[in-house]
Image (cartoon, grey):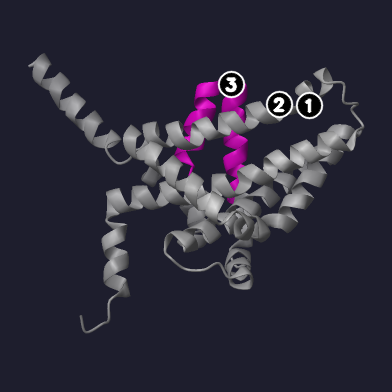
């Protein structure tokens, strides 16, 4: 009886993991690399304004003494702004994955229509991830995986703050291993490199006030934004296709009504 119970639980676990297995997660990373390299400038162009504001705010907060209450207020604005940056580049990557060209104005209008929802859901997501990291690395990765589709579903599916968090969790269940392997490892790599850049420059003798530090930080962030957005859109598409048959739904919707 115990053996049967173990087999039943094992079969359920395998079923849950099957939505985004390791092999498919690696394929998503490879597809995201190809997509972000091919359309690097169109994707970066979409996010250039919020990206520059975001980086300038981070530089100001890190390089100057700012009262605590102003720092907290600016941090809320900065991370909410980053949610908009993510949303617009992910929508751009989503269009490319469907074989459609990126339209700058149309993409931004689509995101701004859901701007408030994107802003606050992104803040909640970032807060939970950082809270998990402070407690322990593993909870941070768990929240990153559970809310991987925020702010994607805000714009693409037109959901509100609470609905987008619940929707992301629903999509993530059964795919946590693959999401952590793809998006979680990328997140750790981004944080690690961002941490090491100023240390390496210090070892090379570059003074703290040098413009080289700013250029290196901007360059690394600019390289990673299109790739991270392409990966988020690719993983979201893969999970929807495997879990909900999105590819078939999209094919049927594109056919003439008579067919």
Which of the numbered marks, if any, corresponds to residue 46? none
For this rendering, which residue is in front, 153 or 29?
29
Q: Position of residue 142 (x, y in %)?
A: 47, 31
Reply above or below: 105 against 208: below
Q: Quadrant of the N terminus?
A: top left
Q: Are marks 2 and 3 in contact (CB under 8 Å)?
A: no
Q: Position of residue 111 (x, y in %)?
A: 59, 63
Q: Position of residue 184 (x, y in %)?
A: 50, 33
Q: Quadrant of the C terminus?
A: bottom left
Which of the numbered marks, if any, corresponds to residue 135? 3
Which region shows up in magenta?
121-148
Determine the main secondary structure of the stretch shown in magenta. Answer: helix
Which residue is found at the position 64% from the left and 44% from the top?
A: 223
Query: Which numbered disc, 3 or 1, marks the residue closer to the eye?
Result: 1
Query: Which numbered disc, 2 or 3, marks the residue closer to the eye?
Result: 2
Which residue is found at the position 68% from the left and 46% from the top?
A: 222
For this rendering, which residue is in front, 214 or 170?
214
Q: Which residue is mark 1?
A: 198
Q: Which residue is mark 2?
A: 195
Inspect the magenta stretch and tell me whether residue 206 lies in it.
no
* Res 186 seen here: yes
């Amino acid at each position: 009886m115990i053996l049967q119970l173990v087999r039943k639980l094992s079969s359920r676990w395998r079923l849950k993991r099957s939505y985004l297995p390791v092999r498919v997660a690696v394929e998503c990373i490879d597809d995201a690399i190809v997509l972000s390299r091919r359309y690097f400038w169109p994707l970066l162009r979409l996010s250039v304004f919020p990206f520059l504001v975001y980086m300038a705010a981070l530089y100001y907060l890190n390089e100057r003494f700012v009262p605590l209450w102003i720092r907290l207020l600016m941090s809320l604005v900065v991370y909410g702004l980053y949610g908009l940056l993510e949303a617009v580049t992910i929508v751009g990557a989503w269009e490319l994955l469907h074989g459609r060209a990126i339209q700058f104005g149309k993409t931004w209008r689509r995101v701004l229509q859901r701007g408030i929802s994107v802003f606050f859901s992104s803040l909640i997501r970032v807060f939970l991830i950082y809270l998990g990291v402070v407690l322990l690395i593993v909870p941070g990765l768990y929240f990153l995986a559970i809310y991987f589709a925020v702010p994607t579903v805000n714009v693409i599916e037109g959901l509100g703050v609470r609905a987008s968090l619940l929707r992301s969790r629903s999509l993530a269940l059964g795919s946590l291993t693959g999401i952590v392997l793809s998006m979680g490892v990328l997140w750790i790599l981004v944080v690690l490199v961002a941490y090491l850049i100023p240390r390496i420059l210090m070892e090379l003798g570059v003074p703290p006030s040098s413009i080289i530090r700013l250029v290196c930080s901007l360059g690394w962030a600019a390289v990673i934004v299109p790739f991270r957005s392409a990966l988020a859109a690719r993983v979201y598409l893969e999970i929807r296709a495997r879990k909900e048959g999105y590819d078939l739904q999209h094919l049927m919707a594109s056919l003439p009504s008579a067919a």
